[in-house]
Amino acid sequence: MSDHVISIVALALVFTIATFTSVHMGALAIVATFIVGTLFVHETTDEIFGGFPGDLFVVLVGVTFLFAIAKNNGTVDWLVHASTRAVRGRIALIPWVMFLVTATLTAVGAVVPAAVAIIAPIGMGFAARYRINPVLLGLFIINGASAGGFSPVSIFGSITNGVVERNGLPGSPTLLFASSFVFNVLLCVVVFFLFGGRKLLGRRAEDSPEDPSIGAGGAPAPRPRGGPADSVGGATAVRTAPPEASPDTVPGTGPTALRLDRVRALTLAGLLSLVVGALFFELNVGLLALTVTVVLSLLSPESAKGAVDRCAWSTVLLVCGIVTFVSMMERIGTIDWLGTSVAGIGAPLLGALLICAIGAVVSAFASTTGILGALIPLAVPFLLAGEVGAVGMVTALAISSSVVDSSPISTSGALVTTNAPEEQRDAVFRRLMAWGMSMAVIAPPVTWAIFVVPGWL
């Protein structure tokens, strides 16, 4: 049995065991990397650790740490209130505002994880305050990032168009961007009605009572043991009485509750620096977020109390563990082996469908950027033969590989999961996993049928 087959079987076992037992998937994935890497692939410990996504770890921790502070001092609550006033209290418009803002960020050059990292905590603040399903808002944010991600000046678009140009293939950057944007808009229409958007129609902010499980600044209040449970956004949450606090510290109940005070102004300045640094100076989002966090902790120690404990460590371990294993698969050439095997199939249309499917499945657990750069060249031989339209094939592969970013194993899905209210986090993880896997199954044949089969591109 080849190393490629062994690694694929091991990955399948990781998901199977973690699904039917209480073993943590991230820890299991790291152990699987150790066993397969040492016994079968003969990698050194340094090589195994080399696959650990340190940059992703810093992004997840840095961003969630920063927004934990922003929740503590009420900045997130202030942003939610200001954004609600901007749409005149129409709650049904909030998901679409999140979609457009995220799409704009990625369209002008922000990397997809950076845009999601900036917007997801704000979106989850909306979900908590106005009883919007966090899965609905999370998917709107992720789809918005993908919608803008293939503009000619964006990261995804630049990589895809660059690979096409280097391999001498015909391309259409404008069509790629327009197709991705429209596809994600239509996908969001489905998401809106599938995850409770219909209930938001006609609702206004003033009609939504405060959620007593949300404490100061939009943070989940402590949950006592026992007590009646209720369903919030599809997940089970415990109803609690509002925490004891002064009127000025409970959002919306006192004259200074939503005032832009010094601490909140400093936090907003920190968040703005995060956006500017990521967009215009290409600074690492995780390192920049940690820098802002440290500065805010020094200037306002009260805001940082307990914030580090609210980083979603379980989700961080989960994502980093899976990515560590997939990195080993990339190092030993399993991903390239799969692509080469598919590209060698005699039936071009079937080969095109399988490449889209591989791009979708692998991208759900790994870097979409890496997949786009790896699979397009593997399809070059039969694309150059003219039996499959290059523009249509590249467009189908790009969309198939990006719409699965909603998987909680991917960076975007993980950022939404880590910023979801703690009592709903497990439910959000499960629903995003189900949605991401369904996209891995549905998106390839749909995009293949639209862009490849007709042969008009």
Image: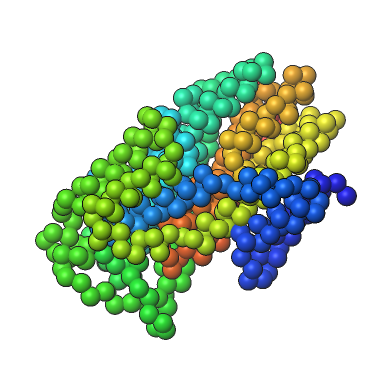
Up/down of 253 relative to 47, above or below: below
Tell me if residue 137 can be seen.
no
- Camera-nearest residue between 37 and 92: 37
Residue at 78 percent of width and 48 percent of height: 42
Is the image coloured rainbow, by chain, by secondary structure, or in one colour?
Answer: rainbow
| Identity of the residue drawn at 46% across and 60% down | 312
Quadrant for the C terminus in the image: top right
Residue 74: % across, % down: 25, 57
- Which residue extends farthest left? 255
- Work out whether residue 166 can be spotted: yes
Q: Can you give x and y, in whole percent of width and height, for residue 294 in the image?
A: 33, 50
Above/below status of 238 relative to 65: below
Q: Is residue 52 above or below residue 275?
A: below
Number of numbered discs? 0
Q: Which residue is drawn at 56% across and 27% down?
A: 159
The residue that appears at 42% across and 32% down in the rendered structure is: 282
Residue 327 or residue 260, whichever sits in front: 327
Left or right? Give the position of 149 relative to 377: left
Residue 259 x %, y %: 15, 54
In the depicted structure, whether residue 118 falls above or below residue 166: below
Percent position of residue 186, x then y: 50, 41
Q: In this view, does 15 lie to the left or right of 82?
A: right
User: Residue farthest to the right?
Assistant: 1
Please, which residue is most extreme toward the bottom here? Answer: 226
| Horizontal relation, residue 241 to residue 20: left or right | left
